[in-house]
């Protein structure tokens, strides 16, 4: 709870030092449950269930107290890694956790707004976690902590509550490099800096945002790809073909999935390749998709994989539903992907391995304009899905787009070699902190909190 005797004022102030050792406490969050209806029809039961779910969430949000720190004993850290959402979006954060865990010179605390995500993260990271469900709790933490930077991995709506904190530099890092339209948001204007992978991302912002200062964009490569993620697959002498589709997005403009349009036919064509191992690794949100076409396509793909695995047990056909995609890429010889970060991560890690890109809209000109990586890929759409089995055989035998992919890798990621993205990321983050701290010292009105007895 906030101390009633504190008040905020505006004073000239130097950025705070970082010398307090982290300490804190942990408590269990309150949960609320209600009984289900019995005698109503399906539609009424669904509405009641939805209403109960929403009410439970509101009760949990309102009843949850901050956890992981005490207002009289604020932990110290250089960086707040901010996550506003529920466990369904944790994949956006978890890919960044090892990057911050590995840096022992810059201390990081994960600031979480959802009690469900908080408890899930307790099982997933060695970083210190702090739960601050309410805005006043968040500001109480920020005003007393030593954060010099706040890092954002998505555009959650409560990011703008966090952005009101004056004394840290606010940096958006997103959760992957992708040509999806959602990768560029007008919300980018709100952050002090937006870290991007390379030239492709810079042009993507220029094409999509009016009145945006490109000087806010900082190319840093893709630090997550530098992580030594082991492959979940055993060694295999033949060709490994991976189909890694994305989900259907929040709306039609962000729908790039091929699961409903081509998915089963893609798997059938891959399974037709002599001696090949076929891997299915969908986006996490495909697994529980409420879109009927995606759910049906996913189920059929699983059936085909299971059937093929039973018929050819030595091949290793598998559906890897929870594996780390970066590990899967390391064992992939031919990647079949949608417009998403998967194809670009494959481009970075396995540039000499063929890439197949799916286009659900069957508009080749628009695809290449929106996703330049298509110029170095075999494209699957309604005009080519019927010949995919033969096309895959040809691609495996001869890869005519290898040199184009090398040029595209530079376009998307620069000339960075594995390991160099991480070095550049931390150098640019350190630079941003130093420059922002210096700018704070020039201000005449800096918000600080004074405690009174």
Image (cartoon, helix red, strand yellow):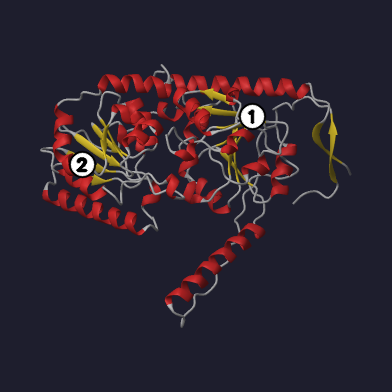
Residue at horizontal 55 percent and vertical 26 percent from the top: 104
- Kindly indicate the quadrant of the structure image that contains residue 325: top left
Residue 94 visible? The answer is no
Residue 55 % position (x, y): 59, 66
Reply above or below: 65 against 156. below
Residue 141's place in the image compared with 352, above or below, is below
Q: Position of 371 compared to 317: left or right?
A: right
Residue 206 in picture, x, y percent from top left: 52, 28
| Quadrant hosting residue 352 | top left
Q: Secondary structure at mark 1?
A: loop
Q: Is residue 244 left or right of residue 98?
A: left
User: x and y percent of residue 347 in the render?
Assistant: 33, 27
> Which disc is residue 278 wearing?
2
Q: Nearer the viewer, mark 1 or mark 2?
A: 1
Residue at image mark 1: 192
Cα distance, mark 1 to mark 2? 44 Å
- Is 115 positioned to the left or the right of 235 in the image? right
Q: Residues within 10 Å of mark 1 (few under 14, many from 20)?
A: some
| Left or right, 421 with reference to 361 | right
Number of numbered discs present? 2
């Amino acid at each position: 709870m906030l101390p009633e005797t504190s008040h905020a004022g505006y004073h000239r102030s130097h950025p705070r030092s970082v010398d307090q050792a982290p300490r804190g406490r942990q408590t269990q969050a309150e949960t609320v449950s209600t009984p289900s209806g019995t005698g109503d029809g399906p539609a009424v039961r669904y509405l009641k269930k939805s209403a109960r779910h929403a009410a439970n969430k509101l009760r949990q949000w309102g009843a949850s107290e901050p956890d992981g720190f005490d207002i009289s004993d604020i932990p110290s850290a250089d960086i707040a890694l901010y996550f506003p959402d529920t466990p369904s979006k944790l994949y956006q954060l978890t890919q960044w956790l090892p990057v911050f865990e590995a840096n022992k010179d810059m201390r990081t605390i994960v600031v979480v707004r959802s009690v469900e995500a908080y408890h899930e993260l307790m099982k997933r990271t060695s970083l210190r976690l702090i739960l601050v469900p309410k805005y006043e709790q968040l500001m109480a933490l920020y005003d007393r902590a030593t954060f010099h930077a706040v890092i954002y991995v998505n555009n959650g709506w409560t990011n703008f509550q966090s952005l009101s904190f004056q004394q840290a530099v606010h940096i958006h890092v997103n959760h992957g490099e992708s040509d999806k339209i959602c990768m560029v948001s007008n919300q980018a204007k709100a952050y002090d800096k937006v870290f991007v992978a390379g030239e492709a991302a810079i042009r993507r912002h220029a094409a999509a945002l009016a009145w945006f200062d490109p000087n806010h964009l900082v190319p840093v490569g893709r630090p997550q790809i530098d992580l030594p993620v082991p492959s979940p697959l055993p060694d295999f002498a033949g060709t490994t073909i991976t189909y890694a589709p994305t989900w259907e997005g929040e709306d039609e403009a962000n729908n790039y999935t091929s699961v409903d349009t081509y998915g089963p036919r893609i798997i059938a064509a891959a399974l037709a390749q002599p001696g090949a191992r076929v891997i299915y690794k969908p986006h996490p949100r495909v697994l529980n998709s409420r879109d009927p076409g995606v759910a049906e396509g996913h189920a059929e793909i699983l059936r085909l994989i299971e059937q093929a695995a039973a018929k050819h047990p030595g091949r290793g056909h598998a559906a890897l539903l929870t594996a780390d995609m970066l590990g899967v890429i390391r064992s992939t010889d031919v990647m079949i992907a949608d417009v998403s970060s998967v194809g670009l991560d494959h481009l970075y890690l396995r540039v000499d391995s063929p890439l197949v890109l799916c286009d659900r809209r069957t508009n080749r000109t628009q695809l290449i304009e929106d996703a330049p990586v298509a110029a170095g890929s075999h494209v699957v759409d309604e005009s080519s899905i019927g010949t995919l089995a033969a096309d895959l055989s040809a691609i495996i035998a001869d890869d005519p787009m290898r040199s184009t992919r090398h040029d595209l890798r530079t376009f998307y990621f620069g000339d960075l070699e594995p390991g160099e993205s991480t070095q550049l990321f931390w150098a640019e983050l350190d630079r941003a902190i130093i420059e922002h701290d210096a700018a704070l010292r020039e201000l005449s009105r800096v918000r600080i909190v004074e405690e009174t007895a």
